[in-house]
Image (cartoon, rainbow, N blue to C red):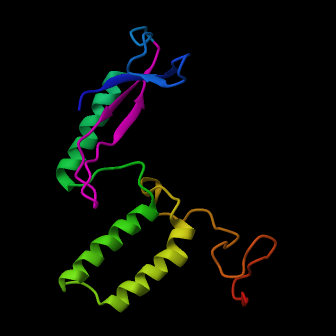
């Protein structure tokens, strides 16, 4: 949980990123500061260490690190910037499915209807959005519905019109 400095310079022979191993990092103005936090394990049980940054100064990085670490400690969740709505929906479905297997959750028919709604409507329409970027106010209106049956290239979709 200590801030570190890294850059996007590449090794000229292998074209791999040098990151923290760049020889020019000690120079002032070269590279930016990042930090990793220990986040709660994901739904799949894997360890998660999201990276925060970039920051121009180490002081900014330490301040943000303290803020994010405090959020994780209070809520048990992290502000993971990379997770999408689609991944979140899949994790939620996996959790509800595991509850149903123990007999405490929803019926199988309800779960299958939920899976269908996720696959047909929610993931195609919203799955690509980053969860951290969602806001309370409405966003831009989509003018097309590529996930609607019969709406392929060259076919228009009109609300309320039959798609068959």
Question: Would you place residue 101 above or below residue 30 in this image?
Answer: below
Give percent across and percent down for residue 96: 29, 76
Give percent across and percent down for residue 97: 29, 77
Quadrant position of residue 83:
bottom left
Q: Nearer the viewer, residue 13 or 146?
A: 13
Q: Quadrant of the C terminus?
A: bottom right
The answer to if 101 sits in the magenta stretch is no
Residue in the image at 28% along x and 29% along y: 62
Give percent across and percent down for residue 163: 72, 87
Question: Would you place residue 164 above or below residue 23 in this image?
Answer: below
Question: Would you place residue 141 above or below residue 53 in this image?
Answer: below
Which residue sits furthest front?
Answer: 13
Which residue sits furthest right?
Answer: 154
Quadrant position of residue 158:
bottom right
**Total labels drawn:** 0
Quadrant position of residue 95:
bottom left
Give percent across and percent down for residue 18: 45, 21
Q: Quadrant of the N terminus?
A: top left
The answer to if 50 sits in the magenta stretch is yes
Residue in the image at 21% along x and 55% along y: 75
Q: Is residue 6 left or right of residue 139?
A: left
Please tell me whether the stretch drawn in magenta is mainly helix, strand or loop: loop
Q: What's the magenta region?
A: 29-56
Q: Nearer the viewer, residue 40 or 45?
A: 45
Residue in the image at 23% along x and 82% along y: 101
């Amino acid at each position: 949980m200590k801030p570190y400095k890294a850059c996007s310079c590449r090794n000229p022979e292998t074209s791999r990123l040098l990151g923290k191993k760049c020889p020019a990092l000690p120079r002032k103005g070269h590279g930016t500061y990042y930090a990793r936090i220990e986040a709660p394990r994901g739904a799949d049980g894997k360890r998660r260490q999201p990276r925060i940054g970039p920051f121009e100064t180490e002081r900014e990085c330490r301040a943000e690190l303290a803020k994010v670490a405090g959020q994780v400690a209070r809520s048990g969740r992290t502000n993971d910037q990379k997770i999408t709505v689609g991944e979140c929906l899949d994790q939620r479905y996996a959790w509800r499915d595991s509850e149903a297997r123990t007999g405490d959750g929803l019926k199988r028919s309800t779960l299958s209807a939920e899976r269908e709604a996720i696959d047909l409507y929610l993931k195609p329409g919203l799955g690509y959005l980053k969860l951290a970027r969602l806001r309370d106010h409405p966003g831009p209106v989509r003018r097309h519905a590529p996930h609607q049956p019969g709406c392929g290239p060259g076919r228009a979709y009109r609300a309320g019109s039959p798609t068959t």
